[in-house]
Image: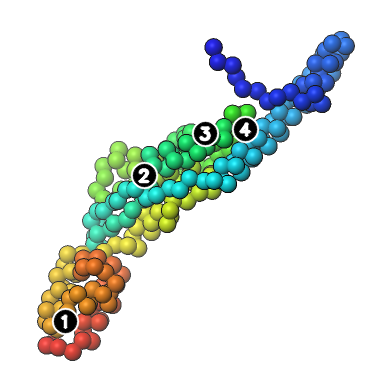
Amino acid sequence: METALALPINQESPQAMMMAAIDKGMDLDKLERFMILQERYEANQARKAYSQAMSDFKANPPEIEKDKKVSYKTTSGTTAYNHASLGNVTDKIGAALSKHGLSAAWTTRQDEKGVTVTCRISHIFGHSEETSLTAALDQSGGKNTIQALGSTISYLERYTILALTGLATHDQDDDGKSAEEVAYISDKQKSTIIDMIQAKEADEKKFCEYMKVKEIGQIKASDFDKAMAALRAKKGKA
């Protein structure tokens, strides 16, 4: 049978004084006041223990690498980004937290505003702290309702534990809202650029170097006009 962990008894704590008072036959009212003082004392000690444990955790935090690549078609082209998977985040952080008597857990709630995920980190002495994030269902990439729900929950679970521990993934994730900023040109825009390169008898390799990409399809949608302007300015066939 497991024995619950408890804070060590300080001889000057309310509990120690209460036990001494019991030995001396103190009345019930005074005992109740001692119990209230003891609860406050333990809560304060547990809070201090949590703060110390979190401080120790942050002194040598785990490095979270982005281990998953996502790519899907949008109306403006192809969106692609890398992010740290939930398993990678929780495994790394969970293992590091446990060394300091800390553990993380999540609760999920859904309403008309979207999905709310709350992450709570608890210390073995009882103190815990939590943070919540809310987001709409992730409908990107043609997901069905269940997939959209799962994607949003996973996203929020990752970011709540990162926020609560004060950590970030290596080179911070560029998914979520910023994903639209890395949308690539569409197939039609790619064909237009290739046709212009051929019409201007331009060097495709040098053009890609100018655009700082390895191949035409990696040109960002936001850079399409820049690419076309550069090609139009090049001397060559009409």
Q: How is the image coloured?
A: rainbow
Q: Position of residue 212 (x, y in %)?
A: 29, 72
Disc 2 target residue:
85
Mark 4 or mark 1: name the one nearer the start of the chain.
Answer: 4
Which residue appears at 33% of the width and 60% of the height? 180
Q: Quadrant of residue 137?
A: top left
Residue corresponding to mark 4 = 127
Q: Quadrant of the C terminus?
A: bottom left
Q: Amino acid at mark 2?
A: Ser
Q: Secondary structure at mark 1?
A: loop
Mark 3 or mark 2: name the one nearer the start of the chain: 2
Whether residue 166 is visible to the viewer of this picture, yes or no, is yes
Residue 61 percent across, percent down from the top left: 52, 46
Q: CA distance from mark 2 to mark 1?
A: 42 Å
Q: Is residue 98 above or below residue 155?
A: above
Residue 47's place in the image compared with 217, above or below, is above
> The residue under label 4 is which amino acid type?
His
Looking at the rendered structure, the secondary structure element under dot 3 is: helix
Label 4, label 3: how far apart the Cα atoms are: 15 Å
Kindly identify which numbered label has been placed on residue 193. none
| Disc assigned to residue 202 | 1
The one nearer the camera, 108 or 59, is: 59
Q: Is residue 100 above or below residue 68?
A: above
Q: Are marks 3 and 2 in contact (CB under 8 Å)?
A: no
